[in-house]
Amino acid sequence: MAASMTTDVTIPISAPVAATVRVCPNRRRRITPEAGHALEILGHAIEYLTDEFVHSSVEPTANDAQLKAVQLLMALNRQVYFECPEVPTFGERWRALLHLLAA
């Protein structure tokens, strides 16, 4: 595991490129300050590497280390984001309230 110099957030190095996550569109997530900081750092790193790649004169190949690094950072970004808990919808909160009142 790797750790940032400024935070206690640890991120596994061997993250899968394509993770199987149940994605619910339009669902908000409760992002902790630590996760937000990690997402910010990962976003800046992804942006920096993609800008460098776009402005380089090197022809892209399937085994390009820079592309693999971007894919790894994007996978880590998704992993951090999807580990944040989903915020319940209004309907879910309403049903929970009704369930508590009925009990």
Image (cartoon, grey):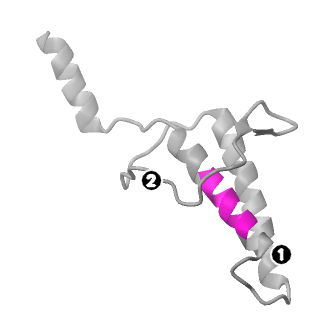
Q: Position of residue 96 (x, y in %)?
A: 23, 24
Q: For numbered disc 2, what is the local secondary structure?
A: loop
Q: Residue at x 19, y 28 (%)?
A: 95
Magenta region, mostly helix, strand or loop? helix
Q: Position of residue 40 (x, y in %)?
A: 71, 50
- What segment is highlighted magenta in the picture? 68-77
Left or right: 66, with 72 as reference point: right
Under mark 2, the amino acid is Thr
Q: Quadrant of the N terminus?
A: top right
Q: Position of residue 38 (x, y in %)?
A: 70, 44
Q: Considering only vertical position in the picture, is 56 above or below 102?
A: below
Q: Residue at x 83, y 75 (%)?
A: 52
Q: For numbered disc 1, what is the local secondary structure?
A: helix
| Front residue of 88 and 83 | 83
Question: Where is mark 1, residue-wise?
Answer: 52
Q: Nearer the viewer, mark 1 or mark 2?
A: 2
Q: Residue at x 70, y 57 (%)?
A: 43
Which numbered disc covers residue 20? Answer: 2
Question: Residue at the top extreme?
Answer: 103
Q: Quadrant of the C terminus?
A: top left
Which numbered disc covers residue 77? Answer: none
Q: Considering only vertical position in the picture, is 66 above or below 16?
A: below
Under mark 1, the amino acid is Glu
